[in-house]
Amino acid sequence: MTNEQIGSLLAGQRKYYKSGATIPVKFRIEQLKKLYAAIKKYQEEIHEALFCDLGKSSYEGFMCESGLVLSEISYMIRHAKNFARRKTVYTPLPQFASHSFVQPVPYGNVLIMSPWNYPFLLAMDPLTDAIAAGNTAIVKPSAYSPATSRIIEKIIAECFDPEYVAVVTGGRAENAALLEQKFDFVFFTGSQAVGKEVLRHTAEHLTPTVLELGGKSPCIVDASADIRLAAKRIVFGKFLNCGQTCVAPDYVLCDSSVRDSFVAEVIKQIKKQYGDRPLENMNYGKIVNEKHFSRLCNLIDKSKVVIGGETNAKTHQIAPTVMTGVTENDAVMGEEIFGPILPILTFDDFDAMVDGLKDKAKPLALYLFTSDKTHVRRVTTEISYGGGCINDVVIHLATSSMGFGGVGESGMGSYHGKTGFDAFSHHKSIVNKKTWIDLPMRYQPYKNKLYEALLHIFLR
């Protein structure tokens, strides 16, 4: 799509938004119901696209993508009316007589830029929130997941007119052309490097922006942890989608006293969950492309591999790989891994380890396996990170009842459920002043001492 076509598309959406068509909550709910029905209708095609792009099985495609989208849509259908209501707030006595309230209103014309690792979920989830909040939207899916982009385009074209919701496909040229436009709100999910570029462009127009980025999310296993259960859950979360998950445990920090038993359990769990030959497992996916496959292969130090390390260049597959004896100086610790490689580092002093994490970039997620309440309190209150779990991984993002997002280097803003509705809304603060009385204290001339005394009382 050319710059002119993108400009024309956005102009059409601006005109449509100004018509007020998206404002009634009844209209929004009707659109969400149409989207829900279309996703159900094309569920098989969605899963086929996810398998084509990432090798995801239908079960994983539903569990981690289409099923979560349907859940978010259902949640918004039930709650959008309440979320859109004005909320009365306390009115100070000096503003007597008046009614104060906060009114959520749509931002207007929004841009949603989604990544390739969960290409359906991370396009349609924010779109659901944008529609519920009353916006028009242009969705820009990743060029790295073309099959999923096509089914997204098909669903949206069937459900909506382009002046309401549209899809722009393509690569860097289209991304650049979109970012040159002035939107009312931009929602981006992707890497930190691209996120910085997005923020530079939106700063030119002073456009409010949500950035869902990533980072090296640590997973702590202390001496009091249930080692068998920790290994089971970490293996699930780390190697889900071949490690191409923004909230996957990037690396493990394991108490040295339980490291050997933990590594042994991790090896058992990999074999149990993926078999002795993971690359032959039809439910085990692939790396998205040659570029990322090569990058990941270069992060593997074969001298430190305790399981895995096998690769298939033709299918872009890397077996679940665990490395021990890793230090901060290893290549695998120099960047977000975003693949099926799990480095295990050790610590001897929990408090010193926590203090060390405070000096690192703020991760999108942090996980702690422990039965020590003091450790839970320290980690949850003292370390800054987007979100996480105690004694589990990844699942904190699979609920519409909590916001999901990063902090610092891992992003800004959050979404899901009401938090998502609020992210795509501006909350107007309004005072409706009554006309049947007009207290004179605020007006000049300021001479009457009685007025001064009353004003002093009111403003205390």
Image (cartoon, grey):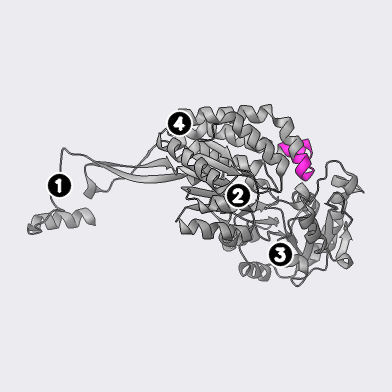
Which sits earlier in the primary sequence, circle 2 or circle 3?
A: 2
Residue 64 seen in the figure:
no
Which sits earlier in the primary sequence, circle 4 or circle 3?
A: 4
Asked if the residue under mark 4 is in contact with the one under mark 2, i.e. CB atoms within 8 Å, the reply is: no
Crowd around label 1: few <14 · some 14–19 · many ≥20 (10 Å): few
Which sits earlier in the primary sequence, circle 2 or circle 4?
A: 4
**SS type, badge 3:** loop
Crowd around label 4: few <14 · some 14–19 · many ≥20 (10 Å): many
Crowd around label 3: few <14 · some 14–19 · many ≥20 (10 Å): few
Q: Nearer the viewer, residue 368 or 13?
A: 13
Q: Which of 255 and 287 is in front in this view?
A: 287
Nearer the observer: mark 2 or 3; the answer is: 2
The residue pinned by badge 3 equals: 335
Distance, label 2 to label 1, CA atoms, is 57 Å
Range shown magenta = 50-62
Which quadrant is home to the N terminus?
Answer: top right
**SS type, badge 2:** helix
Residue 350 lies, in percent from the top left, at 69, 67
Residue 221 lies, in percent from the top left, at 74, 59
Residue 402 lies, in percent from the top left, at 57, 45
Asked if the residue under mark 1 is in contact with the one under mark 2, i.e. CB atoms within 8 Å, the reply is: no
Distance, label 1 to label 3, CA atoms, is 63 Å
The residue pinned by badge 4 equals: 25
Circle 3: residue type? Glu
Distance, label 4 to label 3, CA atoms, is 44 Å
Which quadrant is home to the C terminus?
Answer: bottom left
Whether residue 423 is situated above or below residue 410 in the rendered picture: above
- Label annotation for residue 439: 1
- Label annotation for residue 174: 2
Nearer the observer: mark 4 or 1; the answer is: 4
